[in-house]
Image: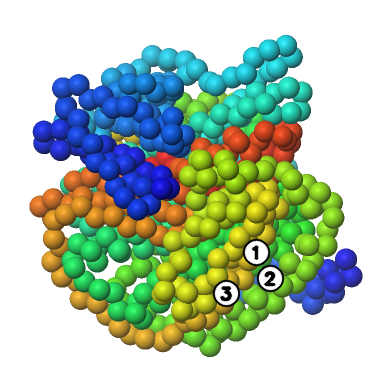
Amino acid sequence: MIKFWNKRAQLGVLTEKPELEESLKKIHKEIKENVKKKFAGSLAIRMVDSGSCNACEAECNALSNPYFDLERLGIYFVASPRHADVMLLSGVMTFNMTPHVKEAYEQIPSPKWIISMGDCPMMQAPFEQSYAINAPVTKHLEVTHHIAGCPPNPVEIMEGFLEFLQKI
Amino acid sequence: MRFIARFCKEKRECFEIVTVYEESTKIEEISKESPRIKTLAKKEPSAIWFERKMQDDFGIIIEDAFDKRPLVHQERFPRDLHPLRKDFKETQLQEAPYLQYKYEEISGDGVFQVAVGPIHAGIIEPGHFQFSQAGEEMLHLEVRHFYKNRGIEKMLEGKTLQEAKPIIERISGNESIAYQICHRDIYLQATKQNLPLSLRKRHALLLELERTIHHLTDFGFIPNDAGFGAALSFASKLSEDARRKMNELTGHRFGFEAVSFENGFIDTASFHEWLDDLEKSVDFFEDWIIDIPSLWDRFDTTGVLPLKKAVKYATVGVVARASGIAIDRRINPFYLEHGFSMASEVSGDVAARFKVRLAELKNSIVMMRNFLEEDDTKLEVTEIYDGEYQSFCESSIGELFMSIDINDGVIKRFFVRDPSFMNWQAVHIMMRHDIIADFPLINKSCDLSYAGNDL
């Protein structure tokens, strides 16, 4: 245990250290303010994968690493759609997932929004229309905001959340 | 003879059933009018998913199979459609009436079913797990996937090898480099070219970097599933650093489009520096984590896959090596010259898989040092010859197998078997002696891909 505390003292605080970009700092501040104003300090997101390549999920997981630590801005990934304000949707909306995505959306209490992420849901990724794909997602559900990228990196996702917060 | 894959090809006059073993390939021709085969699953239990997939995709009847349920086609999929047949051209399907899928269930006094998924509580991919429970104890688990089926095999037909690459590298994001290397090998076979050593080293470096990222991510998530969150913070920092290195080398955080025939600039000095730092961090991590008894209480003897079963189910990769099977596609002179040593454990539990990952990560660091060099070799791409090609690659999960038939310069049949496809079929064995609360831990210790499995 002593070793661990030594290491901790050596490493210090990682968050907000990377690149120390002013823009990143600004995004943090604005997100925090927006979440506070519009969602009483906590924005709950339910991430649903409708057939991605799992890179989008990896980037969402990266949002909670010590560099980005999204939760301190009041944005949480929650375990159930019933706890959520927003559905974050990735993937090409496969034929097999379509009914499940719709059901998950129905389970979210109103008011509710959808943010789509990555190029897949809008059919802009290299994947082509096939019998097993129901994209674009806009055919089935109303999307409030789209975060482009294949996959969008964590900073882009944070920027996307901010744009969404400014939109509504 | 280790079983690797079994799949179907549609020829003009017949269907060809190809069964790939480690040392040989068997081909069986069956008529199109009554496509029937005998099951292989009585001898090779993992053949059952391949056969059920064939049954869905091509309408091949498996005469004496003990399991004839659909695999890829789910409750609302139109009946009697076989999308991989050449005469199937539709690109949009209408939902058919709901037809209940019959799960494997154990019934009895007090035995109940727990259905989990396809959407899980967390940021992970969709898949369904059906447990038969006696109180907390798992009696049986059925893994049901293919929610993410994107029809990739069909999508790639009629494309050239170059056109197919952007799709192939996006089949499974965490194994992208491995998929690209399989594609590269087929490309080289089809153009009858040899790869210059320096390019081979660069690609191998990227593959080891991908493995590093994958294993580092797992060092966070596996302890986290046992309730030890500090490891997640520590390891996710390291994996983010590694991902940024990937971005620095290839211009993409997952290395999409990275395996090309052109050698780019590598800042070797800073890379060496990062490797030294990483090595220190990993040593610290090992020293620290090995000393947490409550964690190893959860890891040891949990989710055991005995050697006998691991062999029987033809498992591959980390799962197989943790159960004592010596298989690794990197056992070849090229890798051995660059410092490869195979990691192996015998107990087959979560702890063994964790330790195999640790050993592999350390070995990857050694190999990355040896692969690192500055070079600007280029390979000119020449004409592609028609033929049937196969390639293998050891991804961060295990052995990846790809088979591409080229006719008139375009892909006629694309088939890929992700390592996850084999290992998912063995996951239910690991649940035999554990409680349901251990399931996330066991599942994560294998860390299999859903996207690569579903295609």
Query: Which residue lies under the disc numbered 2?
Result: B282
Label 2 in the same subunit as label 3: yes
Q: Do callouts 2 and 3 mark residues in contact (Cβ within 8 Å)?
A: yes
Name the image quarter holding residue B258.
bottom left
Look at label 3 and name its amino acid: Ile
Q: Which mark is residue B358?
A: 1
Neighbor class of circle 2 (other Cα within 10 Å; few <14, some 14-19, many 20+) is some
- Look at the picture and state if B422 lies above or below B101: below
Amino acid under disc 2 = Val
**Mark 1 touches mark 3? (CB < 8 Å):** no
Where residue B31 appears, as percent x and y from the top left, is 16, 27
Q: Secondary structure at mark 1?
A: helix
Is B130 situated left or right of B417 in this image? right
Tell me whether the residue at label 1 lies in contact with that at label 2, contact meaning CB atoms closer than 8 angstroms: yes
Where is residue B85? Give x, y as percent. Answer: 21, 32
Instruction: Work out whether mark 2 precedes mark 3 in sequence or the reverse, and give the earlier one.
Output: 2
